[in-house]
Image (cartoon, helix red, strand yellow):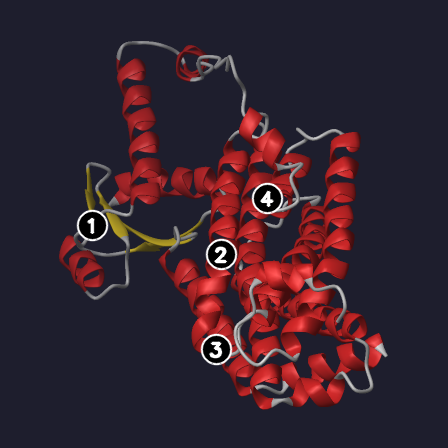
Amino acid sequence: MVRLVARREFVERIRDKGFLISTGITLVILVVFIGVGTFLGDPTRFDLGTVGEGSRSIASQVVDAALELDVDVVVRTWGSRAAAERAIRDGEMDAVIVDGEAVLVRSDPPSPLVRLIQSVSARERSQRALEDAGLGPEQVEVALEQPPLPVTALEPIDERRREYAAVVFVGVLALYGQLFAYGYWVAAGVVEEKSSRVIEVLLATVRPSQLLRGKILGIGLLGLFQLFLIGAIGFGMSQLAGSLRFPTGSLAVIGVVLIWFVLGFFFYATLFAVAGSIVTRQEDLQSTMTPLSLVIIASFFVGIAANEDPSSTLAVVASLLPPSAPLVMPSRIVLGEASIWEALLSAALSIGATIALVPVATRIYARGALQGGRLRLRQALRDRGD
């Protein structure tokens, strides 16, 4: 029976125009964001022109240096400065080296390309100065090939940790939005069934606990499906655009976020079902959802803080409490600040809290489903006969 109710919720919601429109808008925004980010990102290809013999050697060295930075520089030779200036104004060239003594650009200099040209040019001029001073080729080479100063970081940054932090931040942000969206769907669905009296027909053949669990399960599966769809399309577009460097181990990070989405959703969905059970109109739903919304918002900000400092006392405590754990614990797990026993304890507390809430929510759900007006929580909890 729970599976039948879950299937009904999933099918009905996935056909809902609101769901299709919101998912479509989200995907369009995601694709546009990736496209704009790729278009406005740092270019990896430059067109470099040369005028005069003295520019060719510099351009050749610029091409070699650019390859080490994964930047492609295409060189083209121009017969005169006037022709090169026209090419720059027409957008054919990003920069032109004139006689090895000047660099022409249109307006805003392309910083990566200009830095390479300046570096190579400075080396060329230094080499000529040393040769004019009477040094031999080997002495010049030794003088120019000076090793850079060693850099010692007192608190070195783990680049892999930084990448994981970025991935888990996006995951927590998506989780935050999904908890809000699908928690509201649970509450709104309960109110809709009450106002249309459909729930009275359903309760004649289905027990309240089965109906509640089926509703939460169906909407939860829909939330996971939407998360997977958005993630898959976003990842595919980023790969096609070449704007994403997917760090090793990120799939495990996404798995952690999805696990905590499931734990957090079932916990909050139970509470949102209670919020929908005690009112009879959609207009009154906002007032009963406000406390839950404030808890989710506060947990989200704690989750952001935990992403920056996962070992803080606030992050440790919040990662164990069921209301905030889904938005805080993923960061601590991924960044290596949560031990196995902490993660297991947090998951056990979330599961235990949800299990404890289900019979309470079922009682309020059953009582509120048949209540004509607004129901007070104290009244629903006191009356155990229904």
Relative image position of residue 88 (x, y in whole percent):
21, 59
Which residue lies under the disc numbered 3? 282
**Going 27% across and 25% down the picture, which residue do you hit?**
125
Which residue lies under the disc numbered 2? 293
Residue nearest the observer in this picture, 100 or 218: 218
> Mark 2 to mark 1: distance in Å?
47 Å
Amino acid carrying label 2: it is Ser
Looking at the image, is 304 positioned above or below residue 272? above
> Mark 4 to mark 1: distance in Å?
47 Å
Which residue lies under the disc numbered 1? 108
Instruction: Looking at the image, tell me whether mark 3 or mark 1 is earlier in sequence order.
Output: 1
Report helix, strand or loop for mark 3. Answer: helix
Q: Are marks 4 and 1 in contact (CB under 8 Å)?
A: no
Looking at the image, is 112 positioned above or below residue 309? below
> Mark 3 to mark 1: distance in Å?
55 Å
Q: Which of marks 2 and 1 is in front?
A: 2
Amino acid carrying label 3: it is Gln
